[in-house]
Image (tube, rainbow, N blue to C red):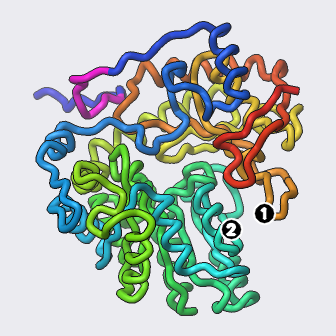
Amino acid sequence: MLQPFQSNTIIEPFRIRTVEPIRFTSMAHREDFLKKAGYNPFLLKAEDVLIDLLTDSGTGALSSHQMGSMISSDESYAGSSSFYKLEAAVRDVMGFKYVIPTHQGRAAENILFSRLARPDDIIPSNGHFDTTRAHIEYAGAVAVDLPCATLKAGPFNGNMNTDALEKLIMEEGKEKIPVIMMTITNNTGGGQPVSMSNLQKVSAIASKYGIPFFIDACRFAENAWFIKTREKGYEETLPIDIAREIFSLADGCTMSAKKDGMSNMGGFLALNDEKLAQSCKSLGILTEGFSTYGGMAGYDMETVAIGLYESLEEDYLRYRIGSLQYIGKKLNECGIPLIYPVGGHAIYLDAGQILTHVPPLQYPGWSFNVALYLLGGVRGCEIGSVMFGSQPDGTEKPASHELVRLAFPRRVYTQSHADYLIEVILSAYEQRKKLGGYRIIEEQPVLRHFSCKLLPL
């Protein structure tokens, strides 16, 4: 009798039937493109990028099921059947009673914090990402990160420090804390997952003090997979059932459906409190659109309604997480400093350790990210002192980490793209001593990394 075949090769759980060409450019061309963009990869034209890992937000490929649903979508202004499909999917997967569609996740954040946050309030999290922090600070509140103690090797480095959370509540008073946020996975902290036990502890603390508990859910399916594969007791549990347990611990969530909603556009705010839901719905009508579309076309709502389920398919999650682990393992074996083990959506290179000769306020993360584009046409995203160094009072201080995030679009790139990326990173690392710092010559007061311009020192 033949023995079962066990393959060590990661194969994509889909077939490619439509292709999009990418353009090869020379290093001289890329140097010119960078100068014209003020050395800001955000300002590069997409056609001038070979492998685009700037973000995994809205950049994935749609399935044939999603494409088919777009044909039959309902674009009615009010009462669209496509909305009710979205609502049913959110209620089934996440369990929340009220669903307010938005054009993307940051709009859901804007609505939530506009209703909950007041000046000088404190909003703790395991790690606020850039738009979350910006909306909190725009409302006059203070965003506080309470991550676990280390980013060294561990199964759930995205966890919140629950001792620090309870200490903060006791010192500041629960009246100053309108909501506790948890980001899954923890994007700021290297895309690291959060354990179910940590979610349970945070939920219990929130319940103890009567504070609403909300989840930034944009990568909930990836987090569910890590719980399944790393946390004792969940080995045989389906990802969708893990997701349902996660959300049963919370009072609501904000969601960028451009990530684990598997859509190119869309998001929502989901919650259980009827009074808060009505207040948020009214603001949503004012800023987004009527409550049964909220900034989304019917075909967007159709794709999200399907995408929430597709993101939880085991074959897909095994391939997605496995691909990132493959790249991370290769880089780690070559001695490249990175957050390891890797998270679910991105490789996080530790530019602070790579460019030890570049001071934090000369932006080593930015420098190494620019080098990846210059050498190989790879566009990533700095998560360091350009993104987080500017303070609300106008001062600047170094960020806690100087990282380069290489975020992978869903169902887009293949094994050969991964191997090419590894080669580009190794080349940049070998030439790291030739890389210098940067200075900002033009910036905006909020979310400056999107539009600032720089010059090499």
Is residue 236 among the parts visible in the rendering? no
- Circles 2, 1 touching at the beta carbon (< 8 Å): yes
Residue occupying the point 36% across, 64% down: 289
Q: Amino acid at mark 2?
A: Glu
Quarter-of-image position of residue 376: top right
Quarter-of-image position of residue 316: top left
Marks 2 and 1, the one that precedes in the sequence:
2
Number of marks in picture = 2
Region in magenta = 10-19
Does the magenta stretch mainly form a helix, a strand or a loop?
loop
The residue singled out by tag 2 in the image is 137
In the image, is 450 to the left or to the right of 244?
right
- Callout 2: SS: helix
| Cα distance in 3D space between marks 2 and 1 | 8 Å
Q: Inspect the magenta stretch and tell me whether residue 15 lies in it.
A: yes
Residue occupying the point 70% across, 74% down: 140
In the image, is 235 to the left or to the right of 106?
left
- Callout 1: SS: loop
Quarter-of-image position of residue 88: bottom left
- For the C terminus, give its image quadrant: top right
In the image, is 192 to the left or to the right of 260?
right
**Residue 402 percent location from the top left of the image:** 74, 43
**Residue situated in front as seen by the camera: 347 or 281:** 281
The residue singled out by tag 1 in the image is 392
